Amino acid sequence: MREPTQSVPWIPRRRSSDGEDGALAIRSVRPEGRRGFESWLMRYGAPYKWRDATKVLVILTALSFIAGLFTLCCLFLRGWPVLWGASPTILRYATWFALGYTGVALLLTARAWLHRRDEAPAPVAVIVAVFFQAIVNGSFAYVAGPFTAAGAYALMTGVMLALVLVDRWLAYASIGVWVATVLAADVLSRQGWLPFRPLFLDTLGAHAGALSAMDYATEIFRGSVTSVIFGGFAIYLADAVLRYWRRGDEMIEQAARVDALTGVLTRHHMMKVVEAKLDESLRTGSPLSLVMVDIDHFKKINDKFGHHAGDVVLKRTASLLSETIRATDAIGRFGGEEFLVVLPDTAVPGALVVAERCRAAMHELAFDALPRVKVTASFGIAAFPEHGDEVDALFDGADYAMYRAKRAGRDRVLVYDEAEALARVSAVHDPV
């Protein structure tokens, strides 16, 4: 007798909904590549669908790097046309700034590019990148002039990018950091602790000491009010447009994540849940169980009472299973009348208890509009590590066990038996 060559036992897959004999096929589950948990900061991002925190680090760091290059040109090369004559004091004391900025920017850029694409960095890294960008842009605006077009560009580009990429509170917090950086630089320079004041005064149209205290304060107030009015309106308008886009994006995401009929997770999202839970179990060694549920004689219910009655049965079954399992478990609609239950930190004995509880609860289902309908379900269980350490193996094992429960008379719970499945493979490949 020839030894089977398949790594996963052959799974006869029903063509009909109730397990009647017919054409059989091998089911092949090919989940998408794992992308890791999405950062809680990345739940927004329409219309560009930028949801990878690594991209945030790359883009924000690149923007900071450009702003820093401009600042360094102003410090060492006496600026671009927006400045007139850098003070020699700046040239003497700018080395620490240049080295510090360049070092931090290169570290952040290297971390962003070298980070694995399928893993999101910690939220702290994203926050640090955003606030680092705000501080660098604040320094850039102070050197270029907070009341120049370049200074406004530094603020607006940073804010707009942050509104698109990260949560709103973080974007608005970065504005506060930007303003605080500019004001702190002004205070420190007027105290003689920071050698940037000559450039700051040049942007007001006068050299150091040429303005009286009253004129200086008046110009500061006038420029600040103007910046707040026009900048605030632009930011508010951009935020309103982005919120409108986000609402549409959230509707699309909700449709992709939640089954419209039953209210449980979709198959696509359940695949991600299983992959994430299995990864966690592989790291920690904790057990994981999958329970495949199939409503018995569902095709007959549709044929006899109509598809509306079938929809009612699906809704009630999904609601019942959701109420019966634990809050830490997950349930999704896996096929037409199939549901998949994921039980983290649960071995086979615990999964049997949950499945039997669900099976017994199905007997209590009553339909006012369908008094003659009696709904039962068949359950198949596969678990890590007993039945494999890959998603395909667990899916196929649970599905095979559920199929055997159908063949054994329905309305029962069976655990995947690999030896029995392998024997069936041998019998099919080498019939006597």
Image (cartoon, rainbow, N blue to C red):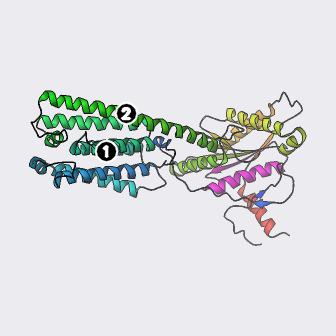
Residue 184 horizontal/vertical position (percent)? 21, 35
Query: Is 401 contained in the magenta span?
Result: yes
Mark 2, residue position: 232
Residue lying furthest front in this view?
Answer: 205
Circle 2: residue type: Gly
Bounds of the magenta segment: 379-406
Q: In this orientation, does residue 204 appear? A: yes
Along the line of sight, which residue is nearer the eye, 359 or 368?
368
| Residue located beneath label 1 in the image | 154
Identify the residue at image location x=47%, y=49%.
Answer: 52
Q: CA distance from mark 2 to mark 1?
A: 14 Å
Report which quarter residue 251 is drawn in. Answer: top right
Residue in view at x 81 percent, y 33 percent? 363
Is any part of residue 346 visible from this angle? no
Q: Position of residue 221 (x, y in %)?
A: 24, 29
Amino acid of disc 1? Ala
For the residue labelled by badge 1, is the local secondary structure a helix, a strand or a loop?
helix
Looking at the image, which is closer to me, 275 or 59? 59
Left or right of residue 24, residue 72 in this image? left
